[in-house]
Amino acid sequence: FFFSHNTRSRRNCGSLIISVATMKFSSKLLVLAAFQAGASGTAAFVSEAPKKFGTKLAASRPPPPAAASRVAEASRRMDDAMRGGGPSDMNRIWDSSSPVTAQGGSLRTWSFATAAIDRVLVMMKTDGRPLNADVELWQGPDNTPQKMRVYIEDGNLRPFSCVVDSPGGQNAIAIRNTATMEYPLAATVEPDAADVSGSLANIGAITSRISGTIPRTVQGGAVYTKPFDPSVASVQVMLRTDGRPLNARVELLQGPNNIKQVIDLYAEDGMERPFFAVFESPGSGNVVRIVNTATMEFPLSAVVEPYMMQAPGVGPDGNAFILG
């Protein structure tokens, strides 16, 4: 019993010594904390205010001037396309298209299986030789609602550009080179589509814009001529009727009786399928002459306006700017 009592006494004494040592260590920590608080000039054990996190995102660095100008130009072209903006240079389409070579006497066709394509852009050119071709719109077997016969003195200086409306059903464009083997031509057919870069620039916007101009009525057998200033680089021509057949002859002259380009056209319905083409008019003394080859019962409405103007040092190529 005496041995057991001594053992418990020793255990109690050890616990007391450990408690005293712990209290001394804690008091030293309190004194050290108070000393640091006094040195820094703040009260000890002061809780910090909660941090506030903003919801505003940091602005990114502005793009360099060159990139900013490209972005602004792309936005402007997109806005113009959405609003039905102005025309673009037809010659630029050749850079992004895949033309097909038609040798003299050969036939090339383009078919459109979907009815969503209601108009196409037909373009032809040569390497500087004369261009003779027939352009036809096929709709069903043995049905040709629109056809044109084209002659150009220089197919490189004045390439052919025409919009052909193809509403409803499956349609096909046929181009036949009526010249001999020594006169090949390059042709491309592009559907109506607006590109961000402005290569095609929305055919529908171009034709709808010129269709808002007050037209000139040309009676059957009558002739309508309109001269242009040398600053006009190209001319746009639109012909239509009130639903009757369209028979006309469009000529580009430079000087007295000097015909540079001729288009003989026929359309089954001049309202459903109007004629729209762009004539390149380099140099001076250019005149557009329109002849209504139908009889008096078939008048037509004609709109002839400048398409692009020559202005040295202005525009993307330095020689022309697009009419706004």
Image (cartoon, rainbow, N blue to C red):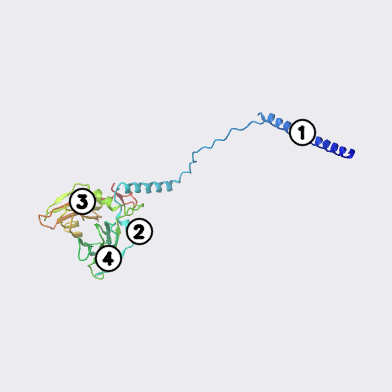
**Could you tell me residue 208's position as x and y percent?**
25, 49
Location of residue 248 with respect to 8 vertically, above or below: below
Task: Work out which quarter of the rendered image holds the N terminus and state it.
Answer: top right
**Could you tell me residue 69's position as x and y percent?**
40, 47
Q: Amino acid at mark 1?
A: Met
Q: Could one spot residue 308 in this view of the protein?
A: no
Displayed quadrant of residue 114: bottom left
Location of residue 301 with respect to 156 vertically, above or below: above
Confirm or deny contact between disc 2 and disc 4 (CB under 8 A).
Answer: no
- Whole-number angstrom distance, CA of label 1 to CA of label 4: 102 Å
Q: Nearer the viewer, mark 1 or mark 3?
A: 1
- Whole-number angstrom distance, CA of label 1 to CA of label 3: 105 Å
Q: Residues within 10 Å of mark 1 (few under 14, many from 20)?
A: few
Q: Nearer the viewer, mark 3 or mark 4?
A: 4
- Whole-number angstrom distance, CA of label 1 to CA of label 2: 88 Å
Q: Amino acid at mark 2?
A: Ser
Q: Amino acid at mark 4?
A: Thr
Q: Nearer the viewer, mark 2 or mark 4?
A: 4
Dot label at residue 304? 3
Residue situated in front as seen by the camera: 169 or 239: 169
Residue lying at 28% horizontally and 53% vertically, measured from the top left: 203
Residue lying at 43% horizontally and 48% vertically, measured from the top left: 67
- Whole-number angstrom distance, CA of label 2 to CA of label 4: 20 Å
Element under disc 3: strand
The numbered mark, 2 or 4, whose residue comes first in the sequence reads 2
**Could you tell me residue 322's position as x and y percent?**
30, 49
Residue underneath mark 1: 23
Residue underneath mark 4: 109
Q: Amino acid at mark 3?
A: Val
